[in-house]
C-alpha cells in the first residue's frame, strides 16, 4: 500500500466530499428514540439513513451492497457490505457507527445551533458531527483510499444503527438476526469513542456498563398538610435517603454492593498510569472546573480508575418533587429518583440489577412501599490484547500520521454493542477509537468535530484494514 497516497487521498476526500455531506447530515434532527416518542412518524432517522446511503452510492465502490434492515417494532439499521479486494482475504471486518443524535439542548454559543453546520477554526459544529455522524464517512473513505493506492481489505460490513443514544436496545436482536450474513468477524472497528488529546491515536480498551433504576418510595395515597402529618408520617425522601445509604457511602461515593464492584486488572492500572504520564491533566481537564471545586481525588491515576473501572451512582432524574414556585406546605405522598449506576466493564448487568432491587426493597424503614418503575441495564466491555499485526499497523500510523505514539485508555461511558460483539466474536480484534477529543462537547451545547484529527483517524483505519487483510 502506498501510504503517502492514502494520506493524500483521505485528506482530499474530507475536503471535497465528506465535509459537504456531513454538514448536510448535521441539518437532519435525527434525535434518538428515547428523546422522540414520535420518531417513526417524524421520519428523521430514516432521513439520516437515506442521506448517508445516497452519499455511499455516489462513491461508486465496485460490488457494494446496501440494505436498510428493519425488524418489527425496532429502529432501522443501515447495512453496507463491501466485498474483499481479493478472494483469499480471510474473515469479516465489522465497522460500526450510529446516526441517531442526542437532543439539541439549549445554550449554544453565539452563531451556533444544533442543526446548523458551522466550520470555525478547523472544527465542524453541530449536533451529531462528532457523535457519531462522521463514522460512515471515515469508514468508507478509508476503504476508498486504500483501494486507490494498492491496499487490500477483507470483506467489510458497515453497521449503522439509529438507537445508540437510547442505549442500543435493538442491537442484540439485530446481531442475532444478521449473524449468518456477518460471517466470521475477525476485526471490529468502532468509531464512536474518543481521544485524550489530538497529538496521537487513542484506543479505548474498556467501557463501563450502565444500569438504570427508578426507585419510588410511597408513604401515603395522597399528600397531607405538613403541619398535621409531619412527625407522624415519615417523609418519603428521608426513607429513600436511608435506602440510598445501603448502596453508596455518601461521604466517599464508594458503591457498597459487592455485586457492583470488580477487581481492576493490573494491565488496566498500568495503562491508566501510562496515559496520565503521557498527557498530564487528561482526566482533570476533561471536565470544566468550577472555581473552588475540588475533584474526588488529587491523584489523577485514581481519577482515571474511578472513571473507568469503579462503579458510581448518579441521580439523573426525580419525580414527586414540585418546582419551587409550586411547592406548598405538603408532606408529599411519594418520592421517585432515577439512578444511573456506571458499573465496571466486567460486571453482569442482570446480577447488578438484582442486587440493587434486593438492597432497596428489603426491610424498608417504616414499611414504606418501594417500587421500581425503571430497571434496565447494559454491560460494559474489556478489550482483548492487541495482536502483533494490529500493533504494527498502529505503530506505522503513529509514525506517518500522528505526532506521538498510539496510547490506550479506559472510558467511563458505554457503547453497549461492544460487549455484545465480544460475546458473539470472542476471537476478534477490536479497534475502538474516534475523534471525540478535548472540547468536542458531545451531548451538550457546541458539539464539534476536529476535522484534521478526523482525517487522521480515517487514515489510521485504512492502515488497520490493510494490515488485517495481510495478516
Image (cartoon, rainbow, N blue to C red):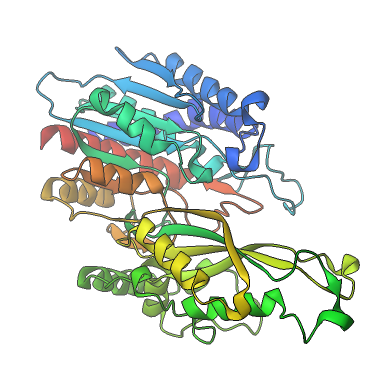
Q: Where residue 8 sits in the image (x, y, percent)?
A: 35, 33
Name the quarter where the N terminus is drawn.
top left
Left or right: 274 in relation to 39: left
Residue at 69%, 74% (x, y): give it. Answer: 236
In-front residue for pair 420/214:
214
At x 11%, y 50%, the residue is 388
Left-right relation of 84 to 470:
right
What x and y, as percent, mark residue 456? Answer: 38, 44
Which quadrant of the structure image shows residue 181? top left
Q: How many marks?
A: 0
Which residue is at a point 68% across and 75% down the rendered structure image? 237
Up the image or down, 247 lies above or below 199; here it is below
Q: Is residue 454 left or right of residue 237?
A: left
Q: Can you give x and y, in whole percent of width and height, for residue 161 in the image?
A: 45, 33
Task: Work out whether residue 220 or residue 311 is closer to the camera in this orientation and state it.
Answer: 220
Is residue 281 at all visible to an observer of this figure? Answer: yes
Amino acid at each position: 500500500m502506498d501510504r503517502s497516497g492514502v494520506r493524500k487521498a483521505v485528506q482530499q476526500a474530507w475536503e471535497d466530499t465528506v465535509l459537504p455531506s456531513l454538514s448536510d447530515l448535521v441539518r437532519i434532527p435525527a434525535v434518538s428514540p428515547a428523546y422522540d416518542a414520535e420518531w417513526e412518524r417524524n421520519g428523521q432517522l430514516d432521513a439520516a439513513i437515506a442521506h448517508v446511503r445516497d452519499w455511499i452510492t455516489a462513491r461508486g465502490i465496485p460490488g457494494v451492497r446496501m440494505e436498510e434492515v428493519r425488524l418489527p417494532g425496532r429502529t432501522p439499521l443501515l447495512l453496507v457490505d463491501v466485498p474483499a479486494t481479493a478472494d483469499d482475504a480471510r474473515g469479516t471486518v465489522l465497522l460500526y457507527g450510529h446516526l441517531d443524535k442526542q437532543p439539541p439542548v439549549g445554550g449554544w454559543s453565539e452563531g451556533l445551533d444544533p442543526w446548523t453546520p458551522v466550520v470555525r477554526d478547523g472544527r465542524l459544529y453541530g449536533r451529531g458531527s462528532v457523535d457519531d455522524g462522521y463514522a460512515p464517512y471515515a469508514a468508507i473513505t478509508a476503504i476508498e483510499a486504500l483501494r486507490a493506492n494498492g491496499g487490500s481489505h477483507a470483506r467489510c460490513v458497515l453497521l449503522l444503527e439509529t438507537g445508540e443514544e437510547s442505549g442500543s436496545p435493538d442491537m442484540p436482536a439485530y446481531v442475532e438476526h444478521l449473524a449468518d450474513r456477518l460471517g466470521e468477524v475477525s476485526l471490529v472497528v468502532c468509531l464512536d469513542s474518543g481521544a485524550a488529546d489530538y497529538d496521537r491515536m487513542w484506543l479505548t480498551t474498556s467501557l463501563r456498563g450502565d444500569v438504570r433504576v427508578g426507585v419510588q418510595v410511597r408513604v401515603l395515597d395522597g399528600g397531607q398538610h405538613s403541619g398535621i402529618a409531619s412527625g407522624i408520617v415519615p417523609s418519603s425522601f428521608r426513607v429513600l435517603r436511608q435506602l440510598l445509604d445501603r448502596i453508596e457511602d455518601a461521604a466517599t461515593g464508594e458503591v457498597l454492593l459487592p455485586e457492583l464492584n470488580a477487581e481492576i486488572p493490573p494491565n488496566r492500572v498500568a495503562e491508566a498510569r501510562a496515559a496520565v504520564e503521557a498527557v498530564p491533566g487528561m482526566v482533570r481537564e476533561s471536565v470544566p472546573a468550577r472555581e473552588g471545586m475540588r475533584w474526588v481525588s488529587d491523584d489523577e491515576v485514581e481519577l482515571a480508575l474511578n472513571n473507568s473501572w469503579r462503579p458510581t451512582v448518579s441521580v439523573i432524574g426525580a419525580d414527586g418533587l414540585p418546582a419551587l414556585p409550586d411547592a406548598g406546605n405538603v408532606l408529599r405522598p411519594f418520592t421517585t429518583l432515577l439512578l444511573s449506576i456506571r458499573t465496571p466493564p466486567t460486571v453482569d448487568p442482570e446480577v447488578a440489577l438484582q442486587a440493587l432491587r434486593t438492597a432497596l426493597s428489603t426491610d424498608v424503614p417504616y414499611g414504606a412501599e418501594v417500587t421500581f418503575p425503571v430497571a434496565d441495564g447494559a454491560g460494559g466491555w474489556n478489550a482483548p490484547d492487541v495482536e502483533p499485526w494490529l500493533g504494527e499497523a498502529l505503530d506505522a500510523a503513529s509514525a506517518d500520521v500522528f505526532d506521538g505514539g498510539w496510547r490506550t485508555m479506559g472510558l467511563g461511558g458505554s457503547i453497549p454493542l461492544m460487549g455484545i460483539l465480544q460475546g458473539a466474536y470472542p476471537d476478534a480484534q477490536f479497534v475502538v477509537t474516534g475523534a471525540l477529543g478535548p472540547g468536542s462537547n458531545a451531548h451538550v451545547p457546541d458539539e464539534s468535530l476536529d476535522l484534521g484529527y478526523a482525517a487522521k483517524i480515517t487514515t489510521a483505519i485504512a492502515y488497520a484494514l490493510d494490515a488485517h487483510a495481510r495478516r
